[in-house]
Image (tube, rainbow, N blue to C red):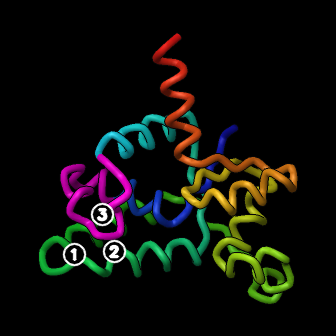
Amino acid sequence: MRSIILDSNLLLLLAIGLWNPRAIRTQKRLSNFSVADFELLKNFLGHFQNILTTAHILAEVSNLAGAATGQTKDAIFLQLQSLFVSLDERTESASILCSLPEFRMFGITDAAISLLSAEILLLTEDGRLAHHLRLKGLRAWTLEQVRALRDQANSA
């Protein structure tokens, strides 16, 4: 596959890790992640030519990053600016997204993600969303599955 879409938490992990991997453990919104998770994500993304996103994901990441303060916040937003302009942003109208069953189940961001998942792989931390999309025959993995693949490769 040439393209991948990251959910909001993983895109935030990527941005913070690219700025300063040590900052991952200090960011409240990334408490479930480690520097090793960032390295795994970065290495996994090396297999793809581009990262697709939506305005909804970018807004969520921006809002999550807004929890930082002072110079840290300034540095994170500079990193977001650099990262965001390198992404392939796709847009769909709210009227179409709101008509999808995923809108009522998960919200508008995940409805937009579900549309893109018809074309590309989604990498998420939301096991419920990933399971739903796989049941529909779409490609959706969790970071936990990528960890398992890595562990399996390392033990072989």
The answer to whether marks 2 and 1 mark residues whose Cβ atoms lie closer than 8 Å is: yes
Spatial separation of the CA atoms under disc 2 and disc 3: 11 Å
Q: Is residue 78 left or right of residue 99?
A: left
Q: Could you say whether the residue bearing mark 2 is in a helix, strand or loop?
A: helix
Q: Which mark is residue 73?
A: 1
Q: Mark 2 belongs to which amino acid?
A: Ala
The crowding category of the residue bearing disc 2, from other C-alpha atoms within 10 Å (few below 14, some 14 to 19, many at least 20), is: many
**Residue at 13%, 80% in the rendered image:** 70
**Residue at 20%, 68% in the rendered image:** 75
Q: Is residue 62 left or right of residue 71?
A: right
The residue at which mark 2 appears reads as 65
Q: Which mark is residue 79?
A: 3
Q: Could you say whether the residue bearing mark 1 is in a helix, strand or loop?
A: helix
Query: In the image, is residue 106 part of the stretch drawn in magenta?
Result: no
Q: Mark 3 belongs to which amino acid?
A: Gln
Earlier along the polypeptide chain: callout 2 or callout 1?
2
Q: Could you say whether the residue bearing mark 3 is in a helix, strand or loop?
A: helix
